[in-house]
Amino acid sequence: MKPSTSTLGPSAPVNSKWAGEQARTAEFAHQTMALPEISLQEIESIRAHRWRTAPARQIASARGALTFISELCFVLLMPISGTELPSLHTATRNDWAWWDWKQTLPERKACYYAKVLRRRGTFISWDWFPAFYAAYADPRPYWRQYREGLLDREEKQILDLLDSRGPLMTREIRLAFGPRSKENTRRVKSILVQLQARFLITAAGGDTEGWSHHRWDLVERWVPSRLLVAATRLAPEKARLWLIERCVRNLVATTPADIAWLFGWKRAEVDQLVAHLLDRRRIARALVPELGGEVLVCSPWPGRARKARACRRLRR
């Protein structure tokens, strides 16, 4: 007896919503079957090389740190607990050399440094500063942002202080802000973080003695004018596309949810931008069996390119 092709039976009513769900599930399964597979070992191997956590690739000098920042375009100072992200701390051979670089590299204007990604210290190469500025900053003067209600009185107070007397050390700002108190100290630190994230102020060097402190200046004064001009000519959406593509390359394998979390953007917006990059084959999708799911990878996948080069060497 030939078995029935439907568990509902011939007289069961058709639920259009259920049928639609089944069709989408079947389409997803078909797409998933066509995806290339990569192993977790491949991902970790490429990350160890790219993130300089492999012993032979560790950084030992400020010059090496700048090379690392240029390679990845943006790098955290320290890792974020519970996440896997490249950082100067994990890439440095010397236990504490990385700690001074957040003052000494900006002091030389060798790169940009501020609390940007997840409000954590982030080194950005000058080549990629325009993309970050276009994606995050409001290019209008800060006094106009204040007039339109985008800045509060205390934020403008610190910006006015830097405008008239900057650059200033953290302790100088704290003393000029108001009476010395723990509450005022916390408030000043909080405001400094917020203004950094909005690309209104930046670290411009600082003190490396003891528990070091930054010197602060206005972004519009400290950053080379040619980079600010380039940033204002770049559309925010295009800048975000560039940053997402670069993020995928830096992380080797990631997901839209992780990208949205890292940059602090809405998931729906990230999904649209990722779809755009996939359509143009700037990035690709792949399966990682050990993780039981799908990830975004750069296109072409670097692991495949390395294998191809190895095969060519063997044929010689």
Image: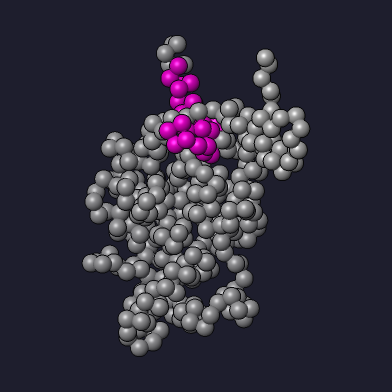
Which residue range is magenta in the image? 286-311
In this view, 2 is above or below 15: above
| Residue 229 visible from this viewpoint | yes
Foreground pick, 38 / 223: 38
Q: Nearer the viewer, residue 136 or 291?
A: 291
The answer to whether residue 132 is magenta is no
Q: Is residue 194 above or below residue 82?
A: below
Question: Residue at 61% across / 67% down in the picture?
Answer: 139
Tell me the quarter of the image containing the C terminus: top left
Percent position of residue 280, x then y:
66, 38
Q: Residue at x 40, y 84 (%)?
A: 177
Question: Which quarter of the rendered picture does the N terminus lie within?
Answer: top right
| Image: 60 above or below 108 | above
Placement of 299 over or under 311, stated as above or below: below
> Does the magenta segment cover residue 300?
yes
From the top left corner, tell me how far across and down residue 86 is, in percent. 39, 47
